[in-house]
Each structure stands twice: as C-alpha cells, then as structure tokens.
Amino acid sequence: MFARIAAMIIGSGLIGIGVNGFLVPHHLLDGGIIGLALILHYYFDFQTGLWSALLSIPLILYAWVKDRGQFHGSIYGMIVTAVFLDLLAPYQFPLPIWLSAILGGAICGIGVGLMLRYKTSTGGTDLIAYFIAKATPLSIGLIIAILDGIIVLIGFQTLGLWSVVFSSITILSAGLLANICYERLNNGSVPN
C-alpha cells in the first residue's frame, strides 16, 4: 500500500513537471486525456488538471465495472495528477523546443510507467492502454503511443505542423519510457 501511494505521488509529480515545465512553454501536446486538456488550456485558458480529471470520468467509470482494484488506483491517481498539473503550472523551463519535447516526454513517460506498474494511473488513456495490454499481446508503451498519436493529430488543425512534429517526439519518448518502466519493473515481484 505504501509503495502504491508513493508511486502515485511521484508519478503524478513527474507528469506535472513534464507537462508544465517542458511542454506548455512551446504549446506542445502530451497525448491522451491530458493532451485534450492541454488543447483546451492553450485556446480557452482552462485549467489543465481540472479538465483532465473531468474528461477522465467516463474511463474511471469503466474501470469501476471492469477492475475495482484499478478503479481505486485510477480515481486517486487522477485526482493527485490533476492537483500536480494545476499546482505546478507556474513552473516552466526555457529550453529549446527539441530538448523540451524529449525531456517532457521522458519525464511524463516515467511517471505514467511508474503509476501503471503499481496499479494506479492518471485515469486517462493510460487506463485504456492498461486494459488493452491485459487483453492483447501489444505492449503498453505501443498502445499509449498510438492513442497519444491520435490526440496529437486532433491538435494539428489548431496548433499547426511544428507542434505536431515536436509533440510526436514527446509521445514517442513518453511511450518508450513508460514501456521500459512498466515492463522492466514488472519483471520483478508484483506488488498488491
């Protein structure tokens, strides 16, 4: 239980740092629900954390029906991630766009992978990826990358080509690191 809470707090904090510190300064997107919340933030100045939580509600309800253990980790993970996203919003790092894309994706990917490893999540598309990975031979990182790529393509019309290109780098970096954290850690003992 302690390890799960620690993973949720550390993972959510990493996602908050990755998104606000590296992606927001260049109007880059993460994928999934947070990516949709970022689109709303860039164009309507909505709070990213609050909207990521609101948009995650249908997925959380699905987890309630399919996997109660994952539901509890996801609802708490969603709330903690939303808090970190909004709490860390003022902290941004002025780095070149290419470096921000790589670092932001890597930090978010580590956060997501760590949370999924301990049966918690942000409640977003990583929750969908978790259920798909359990039912198919596809890796969780690949599923996250595909879902996130769809979200970035949704942002193409409003954010433009450069945002899509560098957001794609972010997503590839995030998917790779999420997969490494989830798979490598899963080779050890599985916590309950």
Image (tube, rainbow, N blue to C red):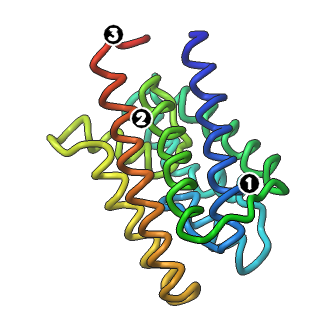
Tell me: 142 left or right of 99.
left
Which one is nearer the viewer's eye here, 59 or 8? 8
Please tell me which residue is depicted at 47% across the width and 34% down the height of the picture.
64
Location of residue 14 with respect to 23 vertically, above or below: above
Residue 130: x and y in percent read: 35, 39
Residue extending farthest to the left is 137
Cα distance, mark 1 to mark 3?
34 Å
Q: Local crowd at mark 2 within 10 Å, few (<14), some, or many (≥20)?
A: few
Residue 53 position (above or below residue 151): above
Q: Which mark is residue 50?
A: 1
State whether residue 163 is above or below residue 5.
below
Q: Is residue 175 left or right of residue 15?
A: left
**x and y percent of residue 134 in the render?**
25, 35
- Mark number for residue 65? 2
Image coordinates of residue 13 in percent, x first then y, are 68, 38
Q: In terms of sequence position, does the residue under pointer 3 or pointer 2 come before the other? A: 2
Q: Residue at x 40, y 43 (%)?
A: 177
Q: Which residue is mark 3?
A: 189
